[in-house]
Image (tube, rainbow, N blue to C red):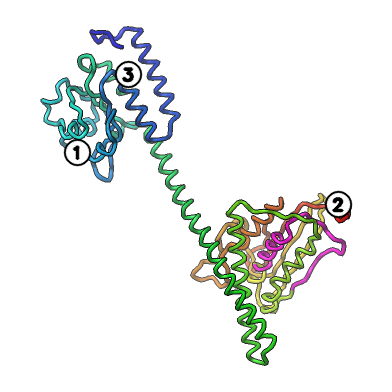
Amino acid sequence: MPNPNHKPDLRYMAEQLARLIEVSVTLNSTLNLDELLRFIIRTATEIIDCESVSILLYDEKRGQLVFAAATGSDPKRLSETPIPLDSSLAGTIFRENKIISLSDVQNDARHKGMVSKNVDFEVHNILGVPMRIKDKPTGVLEALNKRDGNFDESDADILSVIASQAAVAINNARLVKALQDAYNDLRAADQLKTNFLALASHELRTPLGVIIGYATFLQEESPGELSDHAKQVLNAAMQMRVLVDAMTNMDMLRSKDMIMHRLVVPVQQILRGAYGDVKRLADAKGQKVTFDLPAVAIPVKCDPDKLTSAFINLLDNAVRFSPEGGKIIIGAKVRAGGDVLTWVQDNGKGIPEGELKKIFLEFYQIEPHTTRKHGGMGIGLSIAKGLVEAHGGKIWAESPGSGKGTTIKVLLPFLSTTTLQTMKR
């Protein structure tokens, strides 16, 4: 507490300095804007020894100062009271970037009595200092009604220090809040996208199954041209099923609660099973698919359904981006280091070097959507990546360049033949 003559002695100055250091530490460690504002007004009220402290911040959209916080006041009622820049005390402090101290506020025409009425608080004397970051004013910090006499030069110095620190802290808190709001908006949009994938895949699956069933029956039972028409319908439905499966897998990966049912199976079984799912699409384009697989079983521990789904997406990608009559090679081998290397190689359009990593991003497509010639949603490779990594594997793309084909490689942990035989027992 200051002495009666308001002349701070060394002990008082040391106490005030300690409080300012404490304030600085707290301001620099608090990023919640509401907590920060409450701390500033409470602490400034104690240090300056006054009845109330107000924080007014500049609103660029409205071109006015608005109350952000005030001791013992309703923030909503305060925020509804406009403070013009050209005819108010706070506006003068802000515009002229200077300190104002008045011992009798009621005799100053710039004092806005409406504020006092709104918050049931009568102002007698006031000390106001600009809040600024570097030389840019951002608001005003006001101390109201000194408990013992009038505000002096020492009070102005202390309040100015608090205002400077508070301006930086409030700006940081605002930036953090803006980032958090942006993140929440993105997360909400991402959730909408996830919900759409789940709903669309669920609603499409039943009618698609009916179409495939009837198209298969018509193709097998109908003669001549009708059978050919049924074949076209079936091929289109099979492509649609690949998309539906992709959306289902994407939803599963996004949920982050995917359950793995691991078994030890030969990787050859996985690759041939995946090919069986896309064979009809490859046949429709007259593509030749060959296998480069060793005769000896290469065991991997995996969820067969999910790992097969990963390779279905890789093969579907190869079929779509390979030309009519193109060639696709499916291979596997055990590397010297003990891992299982598998690959799907095509002679399609290839991938520019700068795109090799981007193709695994969700919804990313090399071709512009307005001119692209190949179908798909751009999620097949990202799904394959997620499923491979869920098995502890790695996936990457290699391509000599545009028009020279692409090879997608998958590296999986290896189980020795001895392990396979032991687990079979």
- Which residue position holds label 2? 419
Numbered disc 3: secondary structure? helix
Where is 136 relative to 365, above or below?
Answer: above
The quarter in which the N terminus is drawn is: top left
Which residue is denoted by mark 3 in the rendering? 47
Residue at left offset 26%, top offset 20%: 50
Q: Residues within 10 Å of mark 3 (few under 14, many from 20)?
A: some
Residue that appears at 74% across and 72% down: 289
Query: Which comes sooner in the sequence, label 2 or label 1?
Result: 1
Q: Which residues are magenta?
A: 289-316
Residue 173: x percent and y percent? 40, 36
Q: Nearer the viewer, residue 269 or 316?
A: 269
Per the rendering, the mark at residue 84 is 1
* Residue 250: x %, y % from top left: 59, 59
Q: Are marks 2 and 3 in contact (CB under 8 Å)?
A: no
Between the residue at mark 2 and the residue at mark 1, the CA separation in whole angstroms equals: 80 Å
Residue drawn at point x = 44 percent, y = 43 percent? 180
Q: Is residue 301 left or right of residue 157?
A: right
Q: Return the x and y of residue 322 as percentages of the image width and height.
A: 66, 72
Location of residue 220 with respect to 319 vertically, above or below: below
* Front residue of 123 and 139: 123
Look at label 3 and name its amino acid: Ile
Q: Is residue 276 magenta?
A: no
In screen coordinates, is 352 left or right of 177? Answer: right
Residue 291 picture location, percent across and down: 79, 68
Task: State how far apart marks 1 and 3 are (Cα).
Answer: 29 Å
